[in-house]
């Protein structure tokens, strides 16, 4: 079977690049897109090339960035505009293939295997895309070209900005094996620490490690990463015509003041669960797992999740599960900056468990579902503040 030709295209410094396209004067100064410090969203979301020279990092605080570069220009984010630009770039990709799979607003994979006769080889298509995107939108992209999705993404990360990198069957080991293991897709900080304890520092180390060892320490993820490191990723690029199945519904709040104490946390959890449950009911799905995420003032994040006894889209059941997770994993004397609650492993509401006429708890749940749906209708008609 012939190799596929996969591209991964990544818009460079996307938010900052859009702002510079809208206002070219910003290209002349070190600038960054950042949240409003007064609303405690004061972190760097993206920066231009001039700001990068000051070693300004995404997700660091605006205060810290200003210490490095006092003249740094901070621009507030315009998310609706970013979505418009993302759609324009995706439309350009679709001229070359219908196999376009977005990976966030600013990244996408393209399978151009069926387009080679029309447009030339993978590198030629990537170079042409860089040129067309720049001329039509003012943005630059970096592109990786390879025979699988994982290596194509490594290619787009390899050289930036405005560059094409090809990892072929002939050269990939030479370039990819020396890379740090955390360069590989889905190797986060926690996984990197586990790999490090096993003496695995590079992708080459990961490829050479016994698969059984990785499965023993990382579970199924170990098998997947071993496959990725050896260039055996066969995952297809989705078609633009594929409908994306909703896998989770969640919400988060970054609080104006840190939450301290169980009662304060409970109020935050109740507000979030109200919104998440209403969104699930609107999408006619129930969750079978509840996940929480806590961020403290030092931006350290703790995540926990648990399966729940019954599929649900009831706010009070989500609240109970979320609070149980928080009680088991958090000291209420410690401040909380951000909280999120997510309903995961969703199922359609009409495939949920059949209600038993002899089970009082099921009857009560059915009544509560009707009640919360009635509240949804009232809020939709009269606004969210009609019922608290």
Image (tube, grey):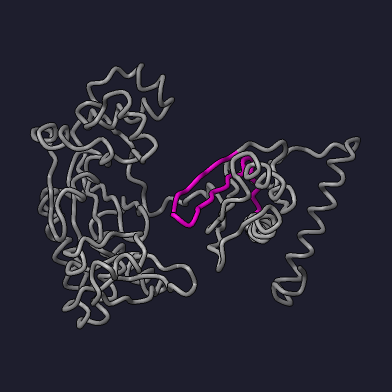
Can residue 315 be found in the magenta stretch?
A: no
Task: Please determine whether, in this image, residue 381 is positioned above or below residue 123.
Answer: below
Question: Is residue 297 in the magenta section?
Answer: yes
Please tell me which residue is depicted at 19% across the width and 28% down the height of the picture: 204
In the rendered image, residue 43, in percent from the top left (x then y), is placed at 38, 65
Q: Residue 333 in the image: x percent, y percent? A: 61, 50
Give the residue at x 28% y 70%: 16
Q: Which residue reaches farthest front?
A: 333
The answer to which of 355 and 255 lies nearer the viewer is: 255
Residue 347 visible at all:
no
Q: Which of 262 and 150 is in front in this view?
A: 262
Looking at the image, residue 273 sits to the left or right of residue 164; the answer is right
Q: As displayed, is residue 95 above or below residue 66?
A: above
Quadrant showing the N terminus: top left
Residue drawn 59% across the image and 52% down it: 341
Question: Seen in the image, is 18 located left or right of residue 37?
Answer: left
Q: Which image quarter: residue 387?
A: bottom right
Viewer-side residue, 191 vs 106: 191
Q: Which of 360 and 263 is in front in this view?
A: 263
Q: Determine whether 131 is above or below 122 in the image.
A: below
Tell me which secondary structure the magenta stretch mostly adopts.
Answer: strand
> Which residue is found at the position 91% from the left and 35% from the top?
358
Q: Quadrant of residue 231?
A: top left
Q: In this view, does 87 lie above or below 220?
A: below
Whole-percent x and y of residue 70?
25, 74
Tell me where residue 222 sits by quadrant: top left
Q: What stretch is highlighted in magenta?
A: 284-305
Q: Position of residue 273 (x, y in %)?
A: 66, 56
Q: Quadrant of the C terminus?
A: bottom right
**Total marks in image:** 0
Instruction: Confirm whether residue 103 shows in the render.
Output: yes
């Amino acid at each position: 079977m012939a190799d596929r030709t996969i591209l991964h295209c990544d818009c460079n410094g996307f938010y900052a690049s859009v702002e510079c396209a809208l206002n070219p004067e910003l290209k002349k100064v070190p600038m960054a897109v950042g949240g409003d410090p007064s609303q405690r969203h004061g972190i760097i979301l993206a920066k231009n090339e001039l700001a990068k020279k000051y070693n300004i990092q995404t997700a660091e605080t605006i205060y810290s960035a200003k210490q490095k570069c006092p003249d740094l220009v901070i621009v507030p984010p315009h998310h609706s505009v970013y979505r418009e630009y993302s759609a324009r770039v995706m439309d350009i990709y679709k001229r070359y293939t219908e196999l376009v799979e977005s990976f966030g607003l600013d990244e996408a994979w393209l399978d151009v295997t069926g387009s080679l006769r029309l447009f030339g080889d993978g590198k030629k298509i990537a170079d042409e895309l860089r040129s067309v995107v720049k001329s039509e939108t003012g943005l630059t992209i970096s592109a990786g070209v390879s025979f699988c999705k994982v290596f194509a993404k490594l290619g787009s990360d390899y050289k930036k900005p405005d560059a094409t990198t090809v990892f072929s069957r002939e050269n990939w080991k030479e370039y990819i094996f020396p890379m740090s293991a955390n360069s590989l897709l889905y190797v986060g900080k926690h996984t990197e620490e586990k790999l490090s304890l096993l003496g695995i520092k590079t992708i080459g180390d990961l490829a050479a490690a016994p698969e059984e060892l990785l499965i023993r320490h990382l579970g199924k993820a170990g098998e997947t990463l071993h496959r990725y490191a050896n260039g055996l990723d066969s995952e297809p690029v989705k078609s633009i015509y594929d409908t994306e199945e909703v896998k989770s519904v969640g919400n988060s709040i970054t609080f104006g003041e840190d939450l301290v104490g169980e009662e304060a946390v409970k109020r935050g959890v109740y507000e979030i669960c109200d919104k998440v449950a209403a969104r699930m009911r609107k999408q006619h799905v129930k969750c079978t797992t509840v996940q929480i995420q806590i961020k403290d003032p030092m931006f350290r994040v703790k995540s926990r999740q648990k399966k729940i006894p019954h599929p649900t889209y009831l706010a009070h059941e989500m609240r109970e599960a979320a609070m149980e997770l928080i009680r088991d994993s958090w000291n209420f004397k410690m401040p909380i900056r951000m909280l999120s609650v997510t309903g995961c492993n969703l199922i359609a509401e009409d495939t949920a468990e059949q209600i038993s006429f002899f089970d009082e708890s099921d009857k009560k749940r059915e009544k509560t579902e009707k009640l919360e749906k009635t509240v949804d209708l009232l809020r939709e008609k009269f606004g969210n503040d009609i019922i608290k």
